[in-house]
């Protein structure tokens, strides 16, 4: 499948970035926004977005986010009952087909992607911030398994499709939920707060068919107090490539994939953009790499 990832950002991204830079680059702004990162505030915001009154926001959001309703499944009753009903809409299967090659690594979501190398000491750097896997996972033994591997960070913006899927099939062997705050996942916040180890998050470990053991993590963000993962009550579960794993409610959010050493070979345009500190626009099901060739 042809690689059609893009590193271009739209005008909405630029406006959002400027506003967040204004807030996070000043001490007063950081002090004012910190209370908004408490999970209770996001729950209140989620309640508002679930109410029928929030439907008034739907027409303008469809226009500004350029949502093509012809690609969406028809909602129950033929109309969206709330803003979150639209935000968590499900697309038709043909709108996000997975690359048919099972050895292809496909993006689990629509997002801005950056790739990072994990050092042998289990550290990777996002801009000037160092993240230790032990802090991210709260599990030193599990963190050691990914030393020297690869971390993929998928940042979802408000106008992205907010459902996500398994990148490869296999046995889901472990699930964990970690409570925390809800900073924005915009890169400017990372300059001042270690957002990925402070924000609430959930992760799953999968013994996969083509990429060894991988870890998939969902990170909540400002105004996203609700991460909805399916089948979390099962201790072990067989999952399929392209099968929906869950969704985020209103706001921006992030998915992190961790792979063990020698498991994946990422496509060169993504590696080059990441080396320049640039994000690559990707869509769910789109090729971003392949299983590493065994010697």
Image (cartoon, grey):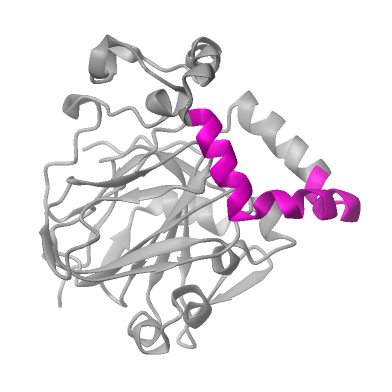
What predominant SS class does the magenta segment belong to? helix
Position of 1 relative to 212 (above/below): above
Position of 186 relative to 131 (above/below): above
Is 173 covered by the magenta stretch? no
Residue 206 position within the rendered picture, expressed as x and y whole percent measured from the top left: 21, 68
| Figure quadrant of the C terminus | bottom left
| Figure quadrant of the N terminus | top left
- Residue at left offset 41%, top offset 50%: 227
Q: In this view, does 273 lie to the left or right of 100?
A: right
- Residue at left offset 46%, top offset 80%: 138
Residue 118 position within the rendered picture, expressed as x and y whole percent measured from the top left: 46, 75
- Residue at left offset 70%, top offset 48%: 36
Q: Can residue 277 be seen in this snapshot?
A: no
Magenta-drawn segment: 23-49
Position of 148 relative to 107 (above/below): below
The foreground one among 86 and 10 is: 86
The foreground one among 5 and 51 is: 51
The foreground one among 176 and 217 is: 176
Q: Can residue 103 be seen in this snapshot?
A: yes
């Amino acid at each position: 499948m042809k690689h059609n990832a893009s590193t271009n950002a739209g005008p909405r991204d630029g406006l959002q970035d400027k506003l967040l830079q204004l807030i996070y680059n000043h001490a007063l702004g950081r002090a004012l926004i910190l209370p908004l990162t408490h999970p209770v505030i996001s729950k209140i915001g989620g309640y508002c977005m679930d109410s029928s009154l929030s439907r008034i926001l739907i027409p303008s959001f469809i226009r500004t986010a350029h949502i093509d309703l012809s690609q969406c499944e028809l909602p129950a009753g033929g109309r969206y009952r709330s803003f979150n009903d639209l935000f968590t809409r499900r697309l038709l299967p043909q709108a996000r087909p997975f690359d048919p090659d099972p050895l292809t690594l496909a993006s689990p979501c629509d997002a801005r992607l950056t790739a990072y190398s994990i050092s042998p000491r289990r550290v990777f750097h996002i801009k000037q911030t160092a993240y230790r896997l032990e802090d991210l996972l709260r599990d030193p033994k599990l963190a050691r398994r990914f030393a020297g591997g690869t971390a993929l960070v998928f940042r979802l913006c408000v106008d992205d499709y907010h459902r996500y899927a398994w990148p490869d099939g296999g046995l889901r062997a472990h699930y964990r939920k970690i409570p925390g705050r809800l900073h924005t996942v915009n890169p400017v916040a990372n300059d001042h707060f270690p957002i990925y180890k402070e924000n609430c998050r959930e992760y799953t470990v999968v013994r996969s068919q083509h990429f060894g053991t991988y870890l998939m993590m969902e990170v909540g963000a400002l105004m996203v107090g609700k991460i909805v993962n399916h089948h979390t009550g099962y201790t072990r579960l067989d999952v399929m490539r392209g099968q929906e794993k869950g969704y985020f409610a209103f706001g921006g959010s992030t998915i992190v994939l961790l792979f063990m050493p020698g498991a994946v070979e990422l496509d060169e345009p993504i590696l080059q953009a990441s080396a320049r500190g640039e994000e690559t626009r990707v869509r769910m099901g789109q090729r971003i790499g392949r299983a590493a060739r065994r010697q």
